[in-house]
Image (tube, rainbow, N blue to C red):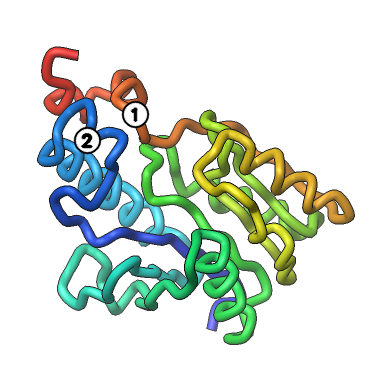
């Protein structure tokens, strides 16, 4: 078994159930297609990493989808909010004997293998690693031991999540990665050629 684990969370790609803020601007069908492209990108980045890989599903585990069971462990998310669900995933990983665990979002077209490999390396000399997102959240969180306090954020999905997380990690050494842009709003699609077909007349 590899001692490093990468985790990502995924929503089941269903019409009207993904990227609601984006759907308000470009419609539910286009938002679904954008989300599928983001999942495909995330899968292609993670499959090339030399560590163990796990996907946590929001609603139910899918057998025949883009996440190949010969490459990815498949789990069900558990918990009432994002913090509880992430804590459960980290607890699972540490219980299984992993020494370094990183979780990444599945809605970043800027994510690449180098960023994740660098994050694992930073954990050699830091307790935690975090990648801040442009919207005030974070796209990556890595740990060598569980810090439950970081998952007790009052309002997930707000622009203070990263700030609150850093405050909760104040007794630990934290390496901060470069800031990246995750895809939540129609404006976030504009810099990327791949998303141009879904911009309509924007």
Few, some or many C-alpha atoms within 10 Å of disc 2 (few <14, some 14-19, many ≥20)? Answer: many
Pointer 1: what residue? 185
Sequence-wise, which precedes: disc 2 or disc 1? 2
Query: Which image quadrant is residue 23 in?
Result: top left
From the viewer's perspective, is residue 46 above or below residue 92? Answer: above
Q: Residue furthest right?
A: 171
Query: Which image quadrant is residue 98 in?
Result: bottom right
- Residue placed most toward the observer, 186 or 44: 186
Q: Where does the image place residue 138, in percent across and percent down from the top left?
A: 57, 43
Q: Residue at x 22, y 44 (%)?
A: 37
Q: Where does the image place residue 107, in percent across and percent down from the top left?
A: 37, 44
From the viewer's perspective, is residue 126 above or below residue 190? Answer: below
Q: Residue at x 34, y 66 (%)?
A: 58
| Proximity of marks 2 and 1: CB atoms separated by less than 8 Å | no
**Residue 120 visible in the current orientation:** no
Query: Which image quadrant is residue 84 in?
Result: bottom right
Q: Residue at x 24, y 61 (%)?
A: 12
Q: Is residue 160 left or right of residue 170?
A: left
Q: Residue at x 59, y 69 (%)?
A: 87
- Residue placed most toward the observer, 77 or 68: 77
Q: Please, what secondary structure does the residue beneath circle 1 have?
A: loop
Q: Where does the image place residue 176, in percent across and percent down from the top left?
A: 70, 40
Pointer 2: what residue? 23
Q: Is residue 69 left or right of residue 89?
A: left
**Residue 27 visible in the current orientation:** yes
Q: Where does the image place residue 114, in percent across and percent down from the top left?
A: 52, 45
């Amino acid at each position: 078994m590899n001692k490093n684990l990468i985790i990502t969370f995924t929503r089941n790609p269903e019409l009207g159930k993904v990227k609601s803020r984006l759907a308000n601007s470009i419609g539910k069908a286009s938002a679904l297609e954008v989300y599928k492209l983001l999942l495909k990108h995330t899968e292609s980045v993670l499959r090339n990493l030399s560590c163990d890989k796990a996907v946590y599903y929001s609603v139910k585990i899918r057998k025949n989808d883009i996440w190949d069971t010969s490459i990815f462990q498949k789990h069900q998310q558990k918990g009432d909010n994002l913090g509880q669900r992430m804590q459960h995933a980290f607890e699972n990983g540490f219980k299984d004997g992993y020494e370094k665990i990183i979780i990444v979002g599945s809605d970043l077209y800027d994510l690449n293998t180098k960023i994740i490999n660098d994050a694992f390396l930073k954990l050699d000399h830091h307790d935690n690693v975090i990648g801040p997102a442009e919207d005030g959240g974070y796209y990556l969180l890595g740990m060598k031991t569980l810090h439950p306090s970081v998952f007790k954020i009052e309002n997930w999905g707000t622009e203070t999540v990263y700030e609150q997380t850093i405050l909760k990690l104040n007794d630990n050494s934290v390496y901060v990665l470069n800031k990246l842009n995750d895809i939540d709003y129609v404006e976030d699609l504009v810099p990327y050629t791949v998303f141009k077909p879904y911009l309509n007349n924007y």
